[in-house]
């Protein structure tokens, strides 16, 4: 259930970010889906990250492929998003401490 909620929230955030693009070849300046990943990770027990991070990668890859990105670009973006989310969550938990409630 939580995975389905995450997938829906991530996909919606990614879709909304895509609406802000100036054209088909432009880059999105803000990626709110990263905030969804960050919120998910900081609210999860760190031992569960090994389950969530692959799920983040899969959801991101599927979303990128559905939006029309070539598979290699989708894989690259997904990998960057997973590393970005894990690094940001690690630094936030280390700096603020756990548990973090939103």
Image (cartoon, rainbow, N blue to C red):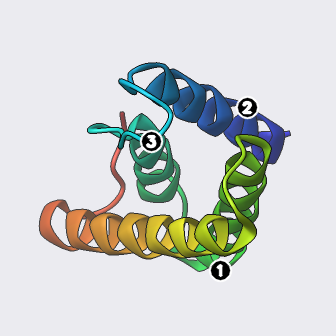
* Along the line of sight, the residue nearer the viewer: 23 or 49: 23
Q: In the displayed structure, would residue 91 be above or below residue 37? A: below
* Along the line of sight, the residue nearer the viewer: 75 or 84: 75
**Residue at disc 1, secondary structure:** helix
Q: In the displayed structure, would residue 12 be above or below residue 7? A: above
Mark 3 / mark 1, whichever is N-terminal: 3
Q: How many marks?
A: 3
Label placed on residue 50? 1
Q: Which residue is outermost to the left?
A: 95
Report the side of 71 relative to 89 (left or right). right
Gap in Å between the C-alphas at discs 2 and 1? 20 Å
Q: Position of residue 70 (x, y in %)?
A: 70, 62
**Residue at disc 2, secondary structure:** helix
Gap in Å between the C-alphas at discs 3 and 2? 25 Å
**Residue at disc 3, secondary structure:** loop
Instruction: Identify residue for label 2.
Output: 8
Which residue is depicted at the point 73% across and 31% down?
8
């Amino acid at each position: 259930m939580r995975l389905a909620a995450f997938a829906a929230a991530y996909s919606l955030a990614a879709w909304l970010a895509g609406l802000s693009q100036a054209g088909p070849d432009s880059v999105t300046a803000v990626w709110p889906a990263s905030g969804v990943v960050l919120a998910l990770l900081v609210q999860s027990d760190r031992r569960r990250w090994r389950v969530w991070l692959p799920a983040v990668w899969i959801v991101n890859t599927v979303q990128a492929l559905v939006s029309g990105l070539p598979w290699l670009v989708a894989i690259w973006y997904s990998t960057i998003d997973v590393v970005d989310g894990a690094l940001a969550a690690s630094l936030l938990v280390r700096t603020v401490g756990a548990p973090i409630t939103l």
